[in-house]
Each structure stands twice: as C-alpha cells, then as structure tokens.
Image: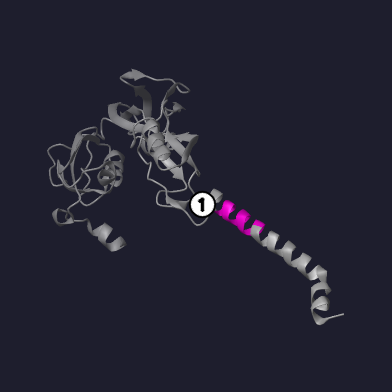
Amino acid sequence: MSTEDINNSGHPWIWTLAGILSVLAVLYFIAHFSLTKYTRHNEEYEVPDFYGMQFDDARALATKNGFRLEVTDSVYSKVLPRGAIFRQNPSAGSMVKQGRRIILTINSVIQKKIEMPLLVGFSLRQARTELSAKGLQLEKLKYENDMATNNVLSQEYKGRPIAAGTLIPQDSKITLVVGQNPNDEKASVPDVIGYTYKMACDIVWDNSFNIEKCLFDDTVISYSDSLTASVYKQIPSPADSSVTTRGSGVTLYFTKDHTKVARPASQTENE
C-alpha cells in the first residue's frame, strides 16, 4: 500500500470531529450575535426626570425614550399639583436598558382625610403638637376670659365649631379658642429675627401671638426657598411695647439674603 493510500484512509474520525466542531462554532456565533442584538447588550439609556410632571406628559416622554411607566403608590404633598409625579424608581439619571419599567409615586388626586382630634382641655403647646402630628395647621388663636390662660376652650374649622372625629382634608387650618385670665392679658413680643419660617412661626404661636402676615422678598422664589428663608424684619418689634395683648398679630418678613439678617445670639452659639 502506498503512502498516499495510508494518508487518505487513516483516521477518518478526525475529519468527522472537525466538521462537527465547525458546525457548532457557526451555531454558537449565530446564537451569540442574535442574543446580543435582542438584548441590546451593553446598550443603556438615561432615565428622564419625571418629578412634578402630570402622568400623561410623563408617559409621552417615557414612550419616546423607550420606557414603560407604572403607578404603584400615592402620597399627599402641598408642594406639588394634584396628580403630579412625586417619586420615581429608578431615579432620574440612572442608566438602564431600553424597555425598563419605571415605578412612580404620584401626588394624590383626592386629598387625604384626617380625623379632627379632641383638643379641648389641652394647653396651647400640647394642642399645637397634636395638630402637627395629625397633619393639620394652626390658623388663629382666639382669646376668651377664663381662669386658665392658654387652655383650649373650643376648636373651630372654617369659622364654625368642629367636633372631634370629624373628617377634614389633611393640612386644614384650625382655629383654637383659648382662655385668658383677665390678670394675664399682656405678653412680650418674641424676637424671631434670623429664624427660619417654621421656627419663627412656632415661637410666635408659643408666645400667644398670631401670624398676621408672612412676606417674602425677591430672593425667595420657590416653596422650598420659603422654608429655609430667615426673618429679617418683624412688626411689632420686641422693643415695641404698644401692642402686647395676647392674640395680637405679628407680621414677619423673610429673605434668603443673609446679609440682611441680624441673627439671634442663641442661634450663633448653637452652631
């Protein structure tokens, strides 16, 4: 037998194996290419910021960018219009695959209802704490002669008495009728210069005065600005003893310009 015959007839399984491996390699590359194309391997897109948008507008933007939206929860925020998007997951700016589902929390269309608490018999400070815990606001103090000063005598909503347990919208404003001993009509006007909105209002209320007005200068643009702005002027001032009857109104002026604010020493010491 010649050398050529031996080479042609030797080890036929090698050629069979080589053919099988070639077919498998082709199938692998076809499958890998198809899967990569189908899953858009390494291709990600930035999630838009939907905060504050109405759902229909957000859905149009999401569709344009290849995302799906799903509302799963709602909250109540007085900062946003009703129905506006409050929160999203994944957050704005995240890089995700096209077609990803974006979970949304929206600002409730129907404002949450709160049971009016029973505040009669509470001290003014206790009543204010309870209102805040329930998601309600103090609107005004009305003083009537009574043996105990700042003891809550009755509670009102929209100018009328309101019974405990009555359902009212969250964030509603409540008027408290409180007692005033005839021998205790006067109170010192507190100094709230330099304090932020909530702190200043709390101090005014706790000292038996009403908030007449809150005025903001042109440095205060947004709602969040109003919360962090500081009092730079108040009327009456602490030095003005002509208006010190409990229940009198105090007007507060707010700014974000700290150069206009003379801050209280107590605040400076605490920093």
- As for residue 155 lying within the magenta part, the answer is no
Report x, y in % for residue 171. Answer: 37, 31
Mark 1 secondary-structure assignment: loop
- The answer, for residue 151, to whether it is visible in the render is no
Image quadrant in which the N terminus is located: bottom right
On screen, 159 above or below 5?
A: above
- CA neighbours of label 1 inside 10 A, class few (<14), some (14 to 19), many (20+): few
With 192 as the anchor, is 38 left or right in this view? right
Q: Which residues are magenta?
A: 27-36
Q: Residue at x 80, y 73 (%)?
A: 8
- Count the marks: 1
Which of the two residues, 63 or 126, is positioned nearer the viewer here? 63
Which of the two residues, 44 or 180, is positioned nearer the viewer here? 44
Q: Residue at x 40, y 52 (%)?
A: 93
Q: Amino acid at mark 1?
A: Arg
Report the magenta stretch's main SS.
helix
Report x, y in % for residue 75. Answer: 44, 35
Image quadrant in which the C terminus is located: bottom left
- As for residue 34 lying within the magenta part, the answer is yes
Residue at label 1? 40
Which of the two residues, 98 or 85, is positioned nearer the viewer here? 98
Report x, y in % for residue 79. Answer: 33, 37
